[in-house]
Amino acid sequence: MIVQKITHCTDSLLTQEMARIDLEECQVVVTWFTNQNNKQSVVHSHPYHEIILPISGSDVLYSFLGNLYTLHPGEMVFFPAEIYHAGRYTVTDTVSDRLVVQINANAWDKAIRQSGLQDPAWQKGIVILDANSVSSWDLRGLLERMAQISHIKRMYQETILTCELVELQLFINQIVEEQHTKSPSATSALISTAVEYIREHYTDPNLTAASLAKYTFTSREHLSRAFKEYTMESIHSYINNLRMQNCRREIAAGRSVLDACTNSGFTNYSSFLKSFRTLHGMTPVQYRTQLRSMERKYSTEEV
């Protein structure tokens, strides 16, 4: 199957592990999310592109590289693959409903080639399309149609999906060219500098809130307050999250748990094991076993 039918998830708790699961059986997954009790996501990145369209209820707030983006119902945001971001879902109301479309990077790139667009700059960063443009071009309808491809004959599915992705890309490109986009609702050069430095040095075991404050020439207290405001995470949690994601990649690549821990910047092995279990509900060894089990399963299915 290339595309799943729309499923509805309520208060689905996003973990970093879930965020990193690639779209294996499908090239596009369309999901309806409702959030009420679960108000915020962890800092995470995806191996796929993501499009989010709030349908009703609360505004949604996203953070990325020291910028805050307020997304109102009817507006649409595009997140390229592999960028770290976090979301807060109940900003102005107690309930948030949004349509989320996850698009395999290879399928997206194939459509870009078919579209004739020459590596458009907008696909390298966050772009928000205003509600009037989204409504005028019925982009919500286009996203929902992507979820219905499973009802089409299998021999036509990939062609139709490529056509719909090309249509989506051309609409986005035109809206961007016409400047019907939104800028960040708030931005901080200080936090942008801090986040970039963390992303480049998070595997350094000497990276701490204190060393980061020294690098940015500000007090630790001021930096900590501003960092929390613009990223929705503490400095410690942000660094820890990136280290954990790197650690899982190391384990998946075949490194020993101890080497993965050390290579990711953790200095206390016991503390690392405790944090890993808290975040993922299993030990690193159990995680490695799970990965190997999944690999055998997919290998058997391919045969």
Image (spheres, rainbow, N blue to C red):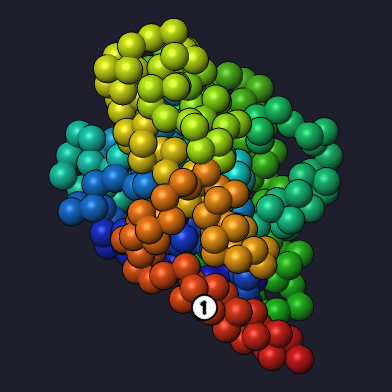
* In the image, residue 197 above or below residue 102: above
* In the image, residue 2 above or below residue 117: below
Name the quadrant containing residue 279: bottom left
Dot 1 falls on a residue whose secondary structure is helix
Badge 1 crowding class, 10 Å Cα cut-off, few under 14, some 14 to 19, many 20 or more, is few
Residue at (61, 53) in percent of width and height: 47
Foreground residue, 65 or 209? 209
Q: In this orientation, does residue 187 appear? A: no
Outermost top residue: 217
Q: In this orientation, does residue 34 appear? A: yes
Tell me: 235 left or right of 77: left
- Image quadrant holding the N terminus, namely bottom right
- Image quadrant holding the C terminus, namely bottom right
- The amino acid sitting under disc 1 is Gln
Residue 268 placement (x, y as % from top left) = 42, 50
Foreground residue, 86 or 130? 86
Name the quadrant containing residue 227: top left
* In the image, residue 122 above or below residue 23: above
Foreground residue, 101 or 64? 64
* In the image, residue 21 above or below residue 293: above
Residue at (76, 78) in percent of width and height: 155
Q: How many marks?
A: 1
Residue 57 placement (x, y as % from top left) = 24, 43
Residue 199 placement (x, y as % from top left) = 56, 33
Tell me: 107 left or right of 103: right
The residue indicated by pointer 1 is 290
Residue 197 placement (x, y as % from top left) = 55, 25
Residue at (49, 27) in percent of width and height: 195
Tell me: 166 left or right of 199: right
Residue at (30, 50) in percent of width and height: 97
